[in-house]
Amino acid sequence: MIPCTEFIPAYSELFRALHRLGGETAVRGFWDYLSEAFLTNLRDLVAEHGLRGCWLYWDHTLNEEAADFTMELDEEAGEFRITMHHCPSKGRLLEATHFEAYPDYCRHCDVLYRNILEPMGYQYEVDLSRCAQAACSVTVRRGGAGVAAEHGPDGRGRRTGGEPHGDRA
Amino acid sequence: MPRQVMERRAADNPYLHKDFHGALNCGIVYLHRHFGEAAVREWLRDFALNWYGPLRQRLATEGLTPLRHHVEAVYEVEGATVRCEQTADDLVVHVEACPAVTHIRALGGDPSPLFVETTRTVNEALCEGTPFRAELLAYDPQTGRSVQRFCRRTP
């Protein structure tokens, strides 16, 4: 068994394997699949609670991952923000000097959550410019360029369901 | 509702996010579907060779005890118990239920038929380049209950 505490290097190595087998297209294909099949709970929480769904989702995941972060929710302003002071995942990869992480490891956080949130009508911005320091930020704003109207009130029209066990990945 | 703020430091929480098991399972499913069984085994082998390099070095030089400590720690952190029987040349690990399989099923998921490779392939790779080899003597895909053996290679 690979313990959940050693998932991150296995994940990084998966990206590397996919890249070797099918280039960036294969890596991106997996991230799209993971959004669809695994992040069902983020989609469900946002569908039910709106922007607060982001708070509920990351409250669970970031605390379980022992992240060093500030999370802010301003529902009146329509904005949710995570400032990741030290990402536990990237931090582990940086600390492991014997292990070479996938160079574009952090970009999955851009793709996975954007795939969920933009079709539901939210703007999703991620600043990965400080990844080398295991730091980043995410901002989600209500009323983005998404296409919620095309997808019904909960933004799920394009989705085809998935496995009911999703979480931050 | 007024603006809400949550501040957390790394030391505020233990690091244990079991839902990662589900993401790992998705990785196996995707790789299997698009690139075949061999790709799944190659990925897990590469992971084990690279990530467990220091442990493999200790296995080669110190024998089975560091490996037993590793196995016990892996299951203990997930709240599972294992029973280990160790001699100088042999280590048998009895796992009542795999915490990863248990968690995936508890959340309504279905482990890939290749999920067993997270034990078999990883254990075999752990032993590469050492005087030992790994065998999976028993594995129940429903629960992940297993009997794993590490023993000294014979010439």
Image (tube, helix red, strand yellow):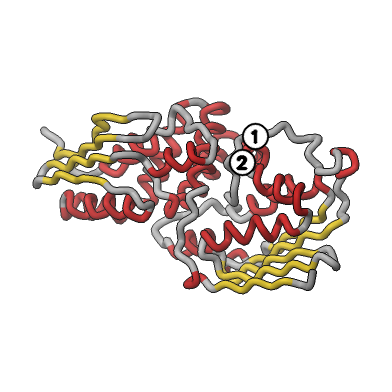
The residue under label 1 is which amino acid type? Gly
Chain containing the residue with disc 1: A
Residue A139 placed where, x, y %?
75, 63
Q: Name the residue under label 1.
A: A162
Q: Is residue A20 visible?
A: no
Q: Residue at x 27, y 52 (%)?
A: B72
Of mark 1 and mark 2, the one earlier in the sequence is: 2
The residue under label 2 is which amino acid type? Phe
Residue B9 figure quarter: bottom right
Q: Mark 2 points at which residue?
A: A38
Q: Distance between the residues labelled 1 and 2?
A: 7 Å
Q: Which residue is drawn at 42% across and 38% down?
A: B101
Q: Which residue is drawn at 72% across and 71% down?
A: B4
Relative to B79, A58 lies left or right: right
Q: Under tag 2, what secondary structure?
A: helix
Determine if marks 1 and 2 fall on one subunit: yes
Q: Is residue B104 visible?
A: yes
Mark 2, other Cα within 10 Å: few <14 / some 14–19 / many ≥20: many
| Residue A98 sits above or below residue B11 on the image | above
